[in-house]
Amino acid sequence: MISQVPASDIDLFSEASLRDPFPLYRQLRDAGPMVWLDRLGMYAATRFDAVRACLRDPQTFSSARGAMISDEINGLTTGSTIGSDDPEHQVHRLVVGRPLTPKAVRGMTERVMAEAEAVVDRLVAKGRFDGVTELAWHLPLTIVSRFVGLPEAGRERMLVWGEAIANMAGPPNARAQASAPALQEMGLYLANEIQREKLAPGSWGAMLIEAADRGEIAAEKIPVLMADYLGPALDTTIGATGNLLWRLSRDPSQWAALRADPSLIASAILEGVRIDPPVHWFTRYIARDTAMNDVELRGDTRVVLLYASANRDERKYPDPDRFDVRRKPADHVGWGHGTHHCLGVHLAKLEMQAVLTALVDRVERLEPAGDPVRKINNGLHVFDHLPLAVH
């Protein structure tokens, strides 16, 4: 029997909501697998099965008009790997993903592990450090930014640009408006600096130019595809690392479990992204009238896929608010699912594995050393600062 979609006036983008959205997600899950959000004027997929079903049906739940809430950002990202459907998406994903395949990432392992060990040695000697700005930032900014191949003058702005994109991806609130200048700066930089003679030979950016030379992609798509490397390669991995370090520092039993059995590091990473994904949502355009979970959904509107809510769905995961490094939730949607599964997932796992392996080898106790500072951002659920102490 087809029924009406329940409606909610919950504001997911108030400062209080962005600090702790999980009680609101539970309210929305309790209301139904699909809920109409009055404040956004779109549906929300709230439960695990509903989010996965949308991600498995790109013909109905399309990315071709963008995957954000903001119409402006959707327009700017059309044709990117995020803002496209097959066959265009598959072509662009193949090109952008070449340096991010499992084989390519394995080739980075020795360098990434050595860099992680060096920075952890230095920080352990200090005894206290910021888990975000001194540790989680390190690998993406010292290694990944060089892989991208941008000139030195732009690398220090990459995190600012990624944060601006995430803010502007949401509704047009004050945070989004304040981020507009940084996004304009990024656009000018990409337009001016993505030149054959300016990009490092063999870099990811140079690979895009070579793909255009071969006719695999249109040359005008290079800037928007280059932008695909900025957020996925940097902000999300930094955020996931910081979120996981926060969890481990607050639960000595979980840290002790990793030290006793370092093979649990892989499942700890899965569990960390399940319970605290750095990106809580993307949207899809509903291309036609459809029905899901016995409710009607109107075409020509949007649905926000609440990944973070799905990852704590009581119908899927027992005791979902409990962090457990032994859980092994390989099917969570923190990295997406289906054709748009995160392109950078193998690199992200390598970076996080390198950091945790180095720490577990050297640190008996990982503890909070002060109050963390959460970033208030429309599209990122991460920390700005995370004071930690090691013993």
Image: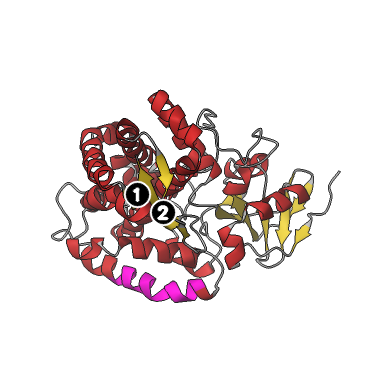
Q: Please report the residue visible at 41 percent of the width from the left and 51 percent of the height from the top.
A: 369
- Give residue 285's position: percent from left, percent from top: 59, 56
Q: Is residue 352 visible?
A: yes
Secondary structure state at the residue bearing disc 2: loop
- Give residue 107's position: percent from left, percent from top: 23, 33
Graded by Cα atoms within 10 Å as few (under 14), some (14 to 19) or many (20 or more), the crowding at tag 2 reads many
Quote the CA–CA distance across marks 1 and 2. Answer: 10 Å
Q: Which residues are magenta?
A: 175-188
Secondary structure state at the residue bearing disc 1: helix
Q: Please report the residue visible at 45 percent of the width from the left and 52 percent of the height from the top.
A: 82
Q: Is residue 213 visible?
A: no
Circle 1/circle 2 CB separation < 8 Å: yes
- Provide the residue designation for mark 2: 386
- Give residue 153's position: percent from left, percent from top: 19, 65
Q: Please report the residue visible at 30 percent of the width from the left and 49 percent of the height from the top.
A: 140
Q: Quadrant of residue 15?
A: bottom right
Quadrant of the image containing the N terminus: top right
- Provide the residue designation for mark 1: 136
**Main SS of residues in magenta:** helix
Front-most of 208 and 147? 147
Front-most of 37 and 90? 37
Find out whether residue 186 is within the magenta segment.
yes
Q: Quadrant of residue 349?
A: top left
Amino acid carrying label 1: it is Ala
Amino acid carrying label 2: it is Leu
